[in-house]
Image: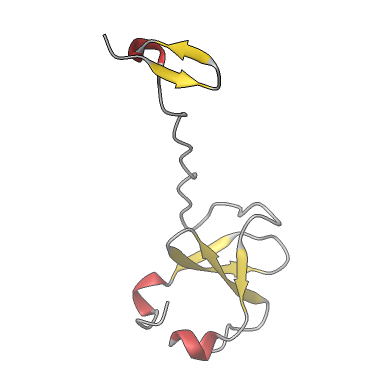
Amino acid sequence: APVTMVGSKKVPPSECRPPPLTISPLYEPGDILPRGQYSMLLNSGYFGLPPAPDGTLYFQVDLKVMLVDQDTHEILEDVSTEVAATF
C-alpha cells in the first residue's frame, strides 16, 4: 500500500486528510459587519459606484461590496451588482 512521508514519519493514506475548509460567514443587509476584518473601498468611482451617502461606507466583504453604516457597521445594502468589472 502507498505510504506518504510527513517529515521522517510514514503516514498511511487513511490518515492523510486536507486541513478543514474555513468558510466565511454570509452577510446580508441588517447584519452587523465585524470591525477590522474587511477592507473599506475608498475610491468608489473607480469601482463604478456613486459616492457613499453621508454616514455610510463601502466595504469589500469576500466577493461582495456592501454599503455599511459607518457608526454601527450595520450592512444597509448589497451593492455588488452595481460594481464595475474592475472589481
| Residue 34 placement (x, y as % from top left) | 65, 51
Task: In the rendered view, tell whether residue 54 sits above or below residue 23.
Answer: below
- Residue 4 sits in quarter: top left
Q: Which residue is nearer to you in this view: 84 or 2?
A: 2
| Residue 82 placement (x, y as % from top left) | 37, 79
Judged left or right of residue 19, residue 71 is right
Q: Quadrant of the C terminus?
A: bottom left
* Residue 65 seen in this snapshot: yes
Judged left or right of residue 79, residue 38 is right
- Residue 68 sits in quarter: bottom right
Task: In the rendered view, tell whether residue 74 sits above or below residue 59.
Answer: above
Judged left or right of residue 70, residue 47 is left
Q: Which residue is nearer to you in this view: 23 or 73?
A: 23
Q: Which residue is nearer to you in this view: 62 or 14?
A: 14
| Residue 28 placement (x, y as % from top left) | 46, 54
Task: In the rendered view, tell whether residue 19 sits above or below residue 8.
Answer: below
Residue drawn at (56%, 88%) of the image? 51
Q: Residue furthest front?
A: 8
Q: Quadrant of the N terminus?
A: top left
* Residue 50 seen in this snapshot: no
| Residue 55 placement (x, y as % from top left) | 68, 77
Q: Which residue is nearer to you in this view: 48 or 3?
A: 3
Residue drawn at (42%, 72%) of the image? 79
Q: Residue furthest left?
A: 1
Residue drawn at (48%, 37%) of the image? 22
Please say which color scheme the image uses. Answer: secondary structure
How many marks do you count on the picture? Answer: 0
